[in-house]
Image: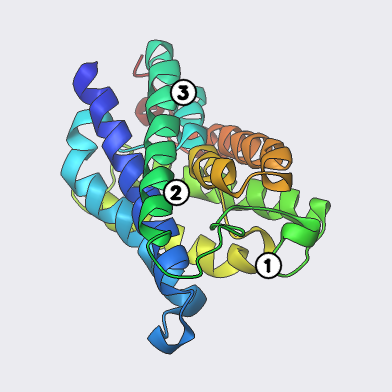
Amino acid sequence: MQKKIAAEFLGTFWLTFGGCGSAILAAAFPELGIGFAGVALAFGLTVLTMAYAVGGISGAHFNPAVTIGLWVGRRVPGVDVVPYIIAQVAGAIVAAAVLALIASGRPGFEMGAFAANGYGPLSPGQYSLLAALVVEAVATFFFVFIIMRVTGPGSAAGFAPIAIGLTLTLIHLVAIPVTNTSVNPARSTGPALFAGGEYVMQLWLFWVAPIVGAAVGAIVARAVTCPKASAPTN
């Protein structure tokens, strides 16, 4: 279990550091030209690279919603759920702290949104609470559905991290203007604690919507799996 917890901590740290870091440190400078597309790609690459690095240890969840979804889908034993989530949230908070330390080294730096997620006035495109709920739930639904399908029986061995990383990239390309893209309660929690104020008050949505979407995605994934392949693993 200690190796699994370490893998989830490091993986979520890398996801938050690489993904949020691309927004905080690089996308803040238009002349670098990475924009939304670059941030989206950065998030996808963090999952892809760490899935290959530690997927064989912990399953490479790096996301409380994914962990809960895979538990609902009978891919993860219940005893792993809470330790995984604690490790994921801790990894995201430490990564956000490191990013804050690095970012504060630039003259005139202000914490601002700090890559946190939000709706209404905190949404990049000023999208409503309802829009944020829908996009986060739908995006996480498909994220977990795809994870379940590409890691299940009959899937092409060794290619799952690529599909999962590209899925996360696509999700960010769609959802960044709406919520700055969460689909991951841990990733949302780390930056929000440093952005503070209303971002922390809005954190509830970025826990509830991804978890609900993930659970439904897992249920649907099991429903479309042939009976022999859908046998519980726990």
Q: CA distance from mark 2 to mark 3?
A: 15 Å
Residue lying farthest bottom? Answer: 31
Task: Give the residue displayed 72% in from the left and 43% down from the top.
Answer: 202
Q: Which residue is mark 2?
A: 146
Q: Residue 196, how many percent across, how many down?
A: 64, 44
Q: Earlier in the sequence, mark 1 or mark 3?
A: 3
Q: Position of residue 160 (x, y in %)?
A: 28, 50
CA distance for labels 2 and 1:
27 Å
- Image quarter in which the N terminus is found: top left
Camera-near label (2 vs 1) is: 1
Mark 1 and mark 3: span between their CA atoms?
32 Å
Q: Mark 3 is on which residue type?
A: Trp
Query: Counting residues from the N terminus, which is met first, the one under dot 2 or under dot 1?
Result: 1
Residue 219 shown left or right of residue 90 in the figure: right
Q: Are marks 1 and 3 in contact (CB under 8 Å)?
A: no
The residue shown at (34%, 43%) is 13
Q: Residues within 10 Å of mark 2 (few under 14, many from 20)?
A: some
Q: Quadrant of the C terminus?
A: top left
Q: What's the mark number on residue 124?
A: 1
Q: Secondary structure at mark 3?
A: helix
Along the line of sight, the residue nearer the viewer: 90 or 36: 90
